[in-house]
Image: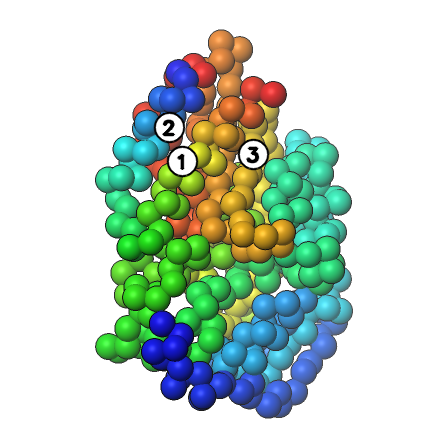
């Protein structure tokens, strides 16, 4: 598995359930980014 | 938006006069005092502003500061942790650092050192939503009910409102510890005069800053099972140091010797009315190798 797979899976799940307001859709990208960063730190 | 609705700001709420403050010395003495007309008071870092904002109706305060049994932090030999509800965030951060460093990391992002010396675990978990319309006396759905609107839909919702599951109210649960405790599979103990129950943190929240804890119940402790080799991490995106989360994320996972991921848990804060678990992603990555 790669970080990209985690990102894709999470993005897919979020996109299937999210209904952001007009100006806060960026939070979905931010959430995926945070999880991706955490996954990168896990092996340390 | 504020300009268009400024007429509402004229009606600034006032805190109801406190009828009395009791200081029970034991849990048994405190529990019978809890009712619809009273509210338990820990560090007061959320309750006092909420009172001034007209969000708390009870006029009787039951201070928990003298109840030693609510302040303990126990670390079992296997690494399990039991934290008393009235333990301060600073006490927790310094005590559990060796066994639950993710809690220490998360606490370091909450508010300021001064507030962390006062704020309690239960206060953090039970704090009310931070929506600025709700907090600033806009007659929104959560304040007025019925057909009242959610002002965040038209107003500034860029940072602190939901992107998932927000319907009549777009606010989110502000507690960072709720996000961390979700991936740690923690449970809270709720006690009333004649009963006690344990509730998984994943079942604790019913809405933004709203929980299953009844007015006659007291959150007495949080139990965190041992990590057993799991890795856990927390990250938070905020506008400034000490701010509430715009988005936060916690992750926990067991990795075997081949690098396969097991029992993955991902919890997001600041995106939904309650801490949000990515169950599909968790299932789909079971057994995969990073």
The secondary element bearing badge 1 is classed as: helix
Residue B233: which disc? Answer: 3
Point out residue A33 in the picture as x, y percentages from the top left corner: 44, 34
Q: Residue furthest top?
A: B258
Residue shown at the point (51%, 30%) measured from the top left: A38
Q: Nearer the viewer, mark 1 or mark 3?
A: 1
Q: Please name the residue shown 56% across and 34% down the image.
A: B233
Name the subunit of mark 3: B
Closer to the eye: label 3 or 2: 2
Q: Which residue was labeled with disc 1?
A: A32
* Quadrant (top left/top right/bottom left/bottom right) for the N terminus of chain B: bottom left
Residue B97 image point, x, y percent: 71, 38
Q: Residue B62 falls in which quadrant of the image?
A: bottom right
Kindly identify which residue carries mark 2: A7
Q: Mark 2 or mark 1, which is nearer the start of the sequence?
A: 2
Going 74% across and 51% down the picture, which residue do you hit? B91
Asked if disc 1 and disc 2 are in contact, CB closer than 8 Å, the reply is yes
- Residues tagged by mark 1 and mark 2 found on one chain of the structure: yes
């Amino acid at each position: 598995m790669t970080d990209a797979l985690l990102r894709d899976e999470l993005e897919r799940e979020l996109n299937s359930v999210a209904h952001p307001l007009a100006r806060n859709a960026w939070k979905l990208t931010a959430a995926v980014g945070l999880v991706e960063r955490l996954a990168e730190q896990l092996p340390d | 938006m504020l300009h268009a609705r400024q007429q509402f700001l004229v009606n600034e709420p006032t805190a109801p006069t406190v009828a009395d403050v009791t200081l029970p010395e034991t849990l048994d003495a405190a529990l019978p005092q809890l009712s619809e007309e009273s509210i338990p008071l820990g560090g007061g870092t959320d309750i006092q502003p909420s009172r001034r904002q007209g969000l708390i109706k009870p006029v009787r305060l039951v201070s928990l500061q003298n109840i030693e049994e609510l302040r303990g932090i126990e670390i079992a030999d296997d690494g399990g942790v039991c934290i008393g509800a009235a333990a301060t965030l600073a006490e927790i951060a310094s005590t559990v650092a060796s066994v639950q460093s993710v809690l220490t990391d998360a606490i370091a992002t909450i508010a300021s050192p001064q507030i962390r010396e006062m704020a309690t675990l239960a206060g953090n978990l039970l704090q009310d939503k931070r929506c600025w319309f709700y907090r600033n006396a806009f007659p929104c759905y959560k304040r007025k009910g019925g057909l009242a609107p959610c002002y965040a839909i038209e107003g500034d919702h860029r940072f602190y409102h939901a992107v998932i599951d927000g319907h009549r109210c777009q606010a989110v649960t502000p507690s960072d510890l709720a996000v961390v405790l979700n991936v740690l599979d923690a449970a809270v103990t709720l006690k009333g005069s004649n009963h006690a129950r344990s509730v998984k943190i994943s079942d604790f929240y019913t809405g933004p800053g709203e929980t299953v804890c009844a007015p006659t119940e007291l959150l007495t402790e949080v139990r965190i099972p041992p990590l057993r080799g799991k890795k856990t991490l927390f990250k938070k995106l905020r506008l400034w140091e000490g701010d509430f989360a715009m988005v936060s994320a916690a992750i926990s996972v067991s990795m075997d010797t081949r690098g396969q991921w097991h029992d993955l848990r991902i919890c997001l804060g600041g995106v939904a009315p309650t801490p949000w678990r990515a169950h599909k992603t968790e299932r789909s990555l079971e057994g995969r190798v990073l």
